[in-house]
């Protein structure tokens, strides 16, 4: 079977969905709303790159939604207090990396299961944020939206930055030793250790990178509106994990590509607009997302079963 | 994953429960001193009335965690079962007790979906229950179109959530029955003992002739059924069935289980430990709300205490995990090289 079977399947599903939209609802493709929709998915893409690396190293991080909210609020508060935007951006990414480092220490060096660790940090950051902001909407100063540029220019910056990051990360996963290390520890941590790779350090690094990417994603989200909500990252973990799993990243680690993740995001992101354009109620979005995750793991399970026999 | 085989680890486990009893006692004294109206009969029944659902989920996912699995979908299952229950009573005019049994059956069915995917197709429990976590909640939201709720249940049914029986809240008796049942199952039957055997070593359990897939699957079915029961009790207490019933409860239940000394890697732990973990958690959350009435501190500081409970729950889970992991590392080291170096076993304080 073709190595890129999953990517091709998801790409055809996406193509089919877009084609039927083109026939039934051509106004879906009007330039401005289409660009806006694409821009709004870019933070998800950046966060999903991180989660894909985490899953490839056979871990999971469900605290990214809380990390994302926390970083967004940190950047927002700093920008609102008059600090230059650049400083706030660096602070958000740094805060994300630190939160990732906490997960990394607990998972890599204490050997705790990542699901429970990140469940605990998820609720800890969420509650700390609630205590700090009391759910208030934070108004941002003028220079923040679209980095102080015009809207089309800002959208171009956000989209190109995300795609440069995606291409860079995809190439790094294929050609840099750090990328190969991630696949190696995800496939078999013990074998990787015997081959001279330090699985603990690699796992730790992946979690730090995940946190930093969550911070960057929060910044890319922040610049898209004049306000920021303390719950802006809610549900991000499900969206990104679903995108990664649908895009062919094996939940058992060691397999998958970032191109598949991009396709997964585009497919899932079009579920809701498609529901509206086909005049269906939008309440089904979450159920459909859950179903898509289950179908994707089901396909994985059936494939590995077939390979065993 | 290597498991410790030393007696000292067992005695540490026994001590874990003793430590929990001490923690609970400490909490009671602390909140009695700091808070107002803490040790009253009224507050005592409140503590348990408001946390029975979490207690039910906690004892129900204990077998799942003992097998080395996890079930993240129980909170969402409560939402789905609550909505289905509301529809059956309000929409179809069913008798609430019959509808309640049907809700429990629906829960078991949902647990069966988890079980089938996990045991028949060998899929990781984490991602399967993450998928059903989204699916069940999504179905509940879709069925209620995001906003509808059901109320107007007969008084005889609401009594389940709001009245007392033999001096205690009625639903606490349901909890006791379920907890005793699961305790008996896990600790007094061959079938239930297999949960720990599977969590300790699935391969070993298979060689010992245990039907691993069937027994693991049943743990998920039980968890689903009890989640359905918890949904019915929640509806009886609130008098309203909504799609958001039980949001975040899976986390609280897992916290109670981990606090209770059940290993998150599977293979060791007791139902009684979970029970104590749940009580410690319930008292903490209730006690913090009592401190808000504290008079000596100024008002702003005092009102923070009430909102600390979520944050503390998260921190508590992290601390309990870290301590559990250190104890395990220590026990493994002790088992590996007897005579032990002078380092004393860490006291498992919370």
Image (tube, coloured by chain):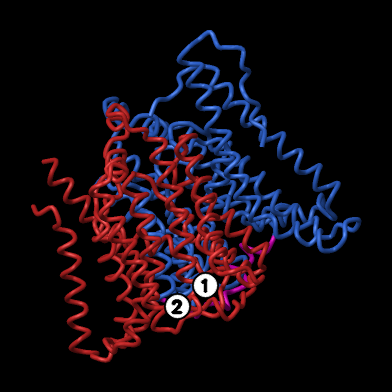
Chain colours: A red, B blue
* Secondary structure under the numbered disc 2 in the rendered image: loop
Residue farthest to the right, as pictured: B296
Instruction: Tell me residue A72's x, y (percent).
Output: 54, 66
Instruction: Tell me residue B241's x, y (percent).
Output: 53, 72
Instruction: Tell me residue B343's x, y (percent).
Output: 61, 16
The residue depicted at 62 percent of the width and 66 percent of the height is: A78
| Number of numbered tags placed on the structure image | 2
Q: Is residue A117 left or right of residue A303?
A: right
The residue depicted at 55 percent of the width and 29 percent of the height is: B326
The correct choice, above or below, for A150 with respect to B142 in the image is: below
Disc 1 residue crowd, few under 14, some 14–19, many 20+, Cα 10 Å: many
Residue farthest to the left, as pictured: A1
Q: Is residue B148 found inside the magenta-colored segment of the image?
A: yes
Q: Which numbered disc, 1 or 2, marks the residue that appears first in the sequence?
A: 2
- Seen from the viewer's position, the closer of residues A169 and A287 is A169
What segment is highlighted magenta in the picture? B143-163
Q: Is residue B345 found inside the magenta-colored segment of the image?
A: no
Which mark, by number, is residue B242?
A: 1
* Secondary structure under the numbered disc 1 in the rendered image: loop
How many angstroms separate mark 1 from mark 2 (CA)?
A: 8 Å
The answer to whether residue B191 is seen in the rendering is no
Chain letter of mark 1 equals: B
Q: Quadrant of the C terminus of chain A?
A: top left
Q: For mark 2, what is the residue? A: B144
Q: Quadrant of residue A217?
A: bottom left
- Seen from the viewer's position, the closer of residues A244 and B160 is A244
The correct choice, above or below, for A107 with respect to B39 in the image is: above
Chain letter of mark 2 equals: B
Q: Quadrant of residue B344?
A: top right
Q: Are marks 1 and 2 in contact (CB under 8 Å)?
A: yes
Instruction: Tell me residue B272's x, y (percent).
Output: 58, 36
């Amino acid at each position: 079977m073709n190595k890129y079977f999953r990517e091709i399947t998801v790409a055809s599903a996406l193509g089919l969905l877009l084609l039927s939209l083109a026939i039934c609802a051509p106004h879906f493709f009007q330039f401005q709303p289409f660009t806006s929709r694409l821009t709004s998915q870019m933070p998800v893409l950046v966060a999903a790159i991180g989660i894909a690396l985490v899953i490839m190293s056979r871990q999971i991080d469900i605290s990214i939604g809380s990390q994302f909210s926390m970083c967004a609020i940190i950047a927002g508060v700093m920008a609102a207090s008059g600090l230059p935007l650049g400083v706030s951006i660096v602070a958000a990414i740094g805060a994300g990396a630190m939160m990732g480092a906490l997960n990394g220490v607990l998972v890599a060096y204490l050997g705790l299961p990542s699901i429970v660790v990140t469940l605990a940090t998820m609720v800890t950051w969420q509650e700390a944020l609630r205590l700090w902001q009391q759910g208030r909407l934070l108004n941002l100063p003028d220079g923040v939206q679209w980095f102080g540029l015009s809207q089309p220019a800002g959208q171009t910056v956000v989209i190109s930055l995300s795609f440069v990051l995606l291409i860079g990360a995809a190439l790094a996963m294929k050609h840099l030793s750090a990328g190969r290390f991630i696949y190696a520890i995800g496939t078999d941590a013990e074998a990787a250790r015997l081959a001279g790779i330090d699985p603990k350090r690699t796992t730790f690094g992946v979690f730090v990178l995940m946190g930093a990417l969550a911070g960057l994603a929060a910044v890319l989200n922040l610049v898209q509106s004049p306000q920021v909500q303390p719950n802006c990252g809610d549900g991000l973990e499900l969206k990104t994990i679903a995108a990664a799993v649908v895009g062919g990243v094996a939940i058992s680690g060691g397999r998958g590509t970032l191109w598949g993740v991009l396709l997964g995001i585009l497919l899932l992101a079009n579920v809701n607009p498609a529901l509206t354009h086909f005049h269906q109620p939008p309440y089904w979005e979450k159920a459909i997302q859950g179903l898509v995750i289950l179908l994707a793991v089901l396909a994985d399970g059936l494939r590995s079963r077939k390979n065993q026999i | 994953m290597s498991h410790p085989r030393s007696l000292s680890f067992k005695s540490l486990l026994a001590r874990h429960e003793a430590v929990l009893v001490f923690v609970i006692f400490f909490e009671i004294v602390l909140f009695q001193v700091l808070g107002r109206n803490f040790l009253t009969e009224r507050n005592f029944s409140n503590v348990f009335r408001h946390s029975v659902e979490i207690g039910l989920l906690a004892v129900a996912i204990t077998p799942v965690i003992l097998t080395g699995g996890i079930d993240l979908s129980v909170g969402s299952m409560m939402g789905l079962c609550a909505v289905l229950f509301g529809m059956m009573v309000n929409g179809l005019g069913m008798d609430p007790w019959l509808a309640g049994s049907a809700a429990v059956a629906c829960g078991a069915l949902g647990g069966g979906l988890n079980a089938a995917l996990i045991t028949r197709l060998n899929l990781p429990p984490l991602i399967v229950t993450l998928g059903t976590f989204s699916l069940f909640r999504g179905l509940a939201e879709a069925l209620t179109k995001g906003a509808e709720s059901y109320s107007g249940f007969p008084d005889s049914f609401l009594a389940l959530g709001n009245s007392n029986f033999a001096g205690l809240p009625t639903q606490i008796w349901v909890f006791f029955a379920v907890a005793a049942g699961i305790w008996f199952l896990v600790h007094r039957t061959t079938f239930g003992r297999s949960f720990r055997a599977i969590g300790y070593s699935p391969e070993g359990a298979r060689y010992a002739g245990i039907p691993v897939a069937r027994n693991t699957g049943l743990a998920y079915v039980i968890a689903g059924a009890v989640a359905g029961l918890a949904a019915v009790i929640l509806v009886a207490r609130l008098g309203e069935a909504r799609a958001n019933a039980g949001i975040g409860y899976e986390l609280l239940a897992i916290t109670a289980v981990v606090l209770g000394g059940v290993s998150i890697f599977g293979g060791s732990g007791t139902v009684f430990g979970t029970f104590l973990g749940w009580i410690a958690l319930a008292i903490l959350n209730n006690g913090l709300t009592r401190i808000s009435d504290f008079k000596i501190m100024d008002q702003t500081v005092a009102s923070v205490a009430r909102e600390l409970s979520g944050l503390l729950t998260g921190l508590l889970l992290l601390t309990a995990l870290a301590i559990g992991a250190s104890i395990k590392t220590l026990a493994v080291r002790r088992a590996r090289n007897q005579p032990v170096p002078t380092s004393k076993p860490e006291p498992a304080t919370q």
